[in-house]
Amino acid sequence: MKRRVRFRVLGRVQGVAYRASAVDAARRDGVVGWVRNLPSGEVDGVVEGEASAVDAFLAWAARGPWGARVERVSTVDEEVTDGELERFEIRRWGDDRY
């Protein structure tokens, strides 16, 4: 069963290679989606794949890379969009694709 989740990570998550590490974690877990920094200092993203793989990625997101200090991860389930996302990528704030 597939799952798609919009997530937001609060804490010390910018300036610690969170986004690059998220790409590595997504590849390891076999999920697609994207991640970006927000002007507020949070990290925002979408992850989609098999439900167990999405859960594994979100467990990583709650820890983050070495040097991060994750305070909270909020999630909202969304409708699965099979085929819209082809890989996991870093996006920039203001990207109008989402």
Image: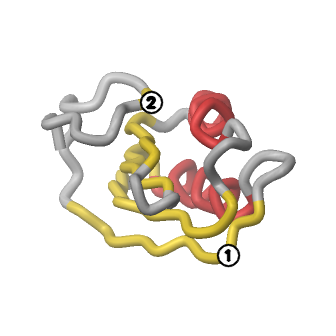
**Compared with residue 78, is residue 36 higher up or lower down, i.e. above or below?**
above
Residue drawn where x is 51% and y is 58% of the image: 41
Residue 86: % across, % down: 32, 23
Which kind of residue does numbered mark 1 sit on? Glu
Q: As rendered, which of 47 and 63 lies closer to the eye?
A: 63
Give the colour scheme shown. secondary structure
**Compared with residue 27, is residue 69 higher up or lower down, i.e. above or below?**
below
- How far is mark 2 from mark 1, CA to CA? 21 Å
Q: Residue furthest right?
A: 66
Q: As rendered, which of 40 and 21 lies closer to the eye?
A: 40
**Compared with residue 19, is residue 48 higher up or lower down, i.e. above or below?**
below
Relative side of 91 to 66, left or right? left
Which kind of residue does numbered mark 2 sit on? Ile
Q: Please identify the quadrant where the C terminus is shown.
A: top left
Determine which residue is flagged by label 2. Answer: 90
> Which mark identifies residue 81?
none
Residue 63: % across, % down: 75, 61
SS for dot 1? strand
Q: Residue furthest top?
A: 86
- Quadrant for residue 95, please give it: top left
Determine which residue is flagged by label 1. Answer: 71
Residue drawn where x is 40% and y is 50% of the image: 45
Residue drawn where x is 43% and y is 62% of the image: 40
Q: Please identify the quadrant where the N terminus is shown.
A: bottom left
Residue drawn where x is 60% and y is 76% of the image: 72
Circle 1 residues within 10 Å: few <14, some 14–19, many ≥20: few
SS for dot 2? strand
